[in-house]
């Protein structure tokens, strides 16, 4: 009996708990996004992509850990937006618009920690524009333009 229980527990722990524990989770308080807990499994953008947007030299490693966490948060944000819109995630291969959204959302997460609000908002707006452009194109949503 003991051996069966230990086998069951080990199997449960490996398949359920560890999968849950290491999967990305968005933790929210109210309507504001606070952080993502877990490891990103998507990788829609790279560290150098984000550094390019932020105009940080690619050889500067000072903020690499924080930027990597911001990328994980951005990717989780995109996955949740995409799930809401009916897409299957993670994206594979990664569409260019999703990669661009990821690097701008990651830059937004980074800039929210100390830049003027207008600069951070611009990065958010660009990220949303890339995501919405992809969503609208895939869902074939018509834009009326000038009437």
Image (cartoon, rainbow, N blue to C red):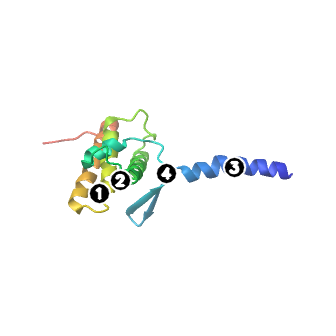
Residue carrying label 2: 63
In whole angstroms, how far apart are the C-alphas of marks 1 and 2?
Answer: 12 Å
Residue 39 percent coordinates (x, y): 49, 49
**Direction bottom: furthest residue:** 30
Q: Is residue 113 visible?
A: yes
Residue 44 percent coordinates (x, y): 39, 41
**Which numbered marker is on residue 12?**
3
Q: Choose mark 2 or mark 3, whichever is in front.
A: 2
Callouts 4 and 2 close, C-beta under 8 Å: no
Residue carrying label 1: 111
Element marked by disc 3: helix
Task: Work out whether mark 1 precedes mark 3 in sequence or the reverse, and give the earlier one.
Answer: 3
Q: Choose mark 1 or mark 4, whichever is in front.
A: 1
Q: Nearer the viewer, residue 142 or 3?
A: 3
In whole angstroms, how far apart are the C-alphas of marks 1 and 3?
Answer: 40 Å
**Screen quadrant of the C terminus:** top left
Residue drawn at (34%, 38%) of the image: 139
Q: Choose mark 1 or mark 2, whichever is in front.
A: 2
In whole angstroms, how far apart are the C-alphas of marks 2 and 3?
Answer: 37 Å
Element marked by disc 2: loop
Q: In the image, is 65 to the left or to the right of 136?
A: right
Residue drawn at (38%, 50%) of the image: 64
Residue carrying label 4: 24
Label 2 environment density (alpha carbons within 10 Å; few <14, some 14–19, many ≥20): few
Residue 116 percent coordinates (x, y): 22, 62
Task: Work out whether mark 4 precedes mark 2 in sequence or the reverse, and give the earlier one.
Answer: 4
Q: In the image, is 83 to the left or to the right of 139?
A: right
Give the quarter of the image for residue 29: bottom left
Residue 60 percent coordinates (x, y): 32, 48
Task: Work out whether mark 2 precedes mark 3 in sequence or the reverse, and give the earlier one.
Answer: 3
Callouts 2 and 3 close, C-beta under 8 Å: no
Element marked by disc 4: loop
């Amino acid at each position: 009996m003991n051996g069966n229980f230990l086998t069951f527990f080990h199997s449960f722990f490996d398949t359920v708990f560890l999968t849950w524990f290491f999967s990305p989770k968005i933790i929210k308080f109210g309507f504001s996004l606070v952080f993502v807990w877990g490891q990103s499994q998507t990788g829609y953008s790279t560290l150098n992509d984000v550094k390019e947007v932020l105009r940080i030299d690619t050889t500067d490693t000072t903020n690499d850990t924080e930027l990597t966490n911001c990328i994980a948060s951005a990717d989780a944000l995109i996955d949740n937006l995409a799930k809401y819109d009916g897409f299957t995630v993670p994206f594979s291969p990664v569409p260019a618009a999703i990669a661009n959204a990821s690097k701008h959302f990651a830059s937004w997460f980074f800039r929210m920690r100390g830049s003027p609000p207008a600069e951070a908002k611009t990065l958010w707006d660009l990220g949303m524009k890339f995501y919405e452009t992809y969503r609208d194109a895939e869902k074939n949503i018509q834009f009326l333009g000038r009437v």
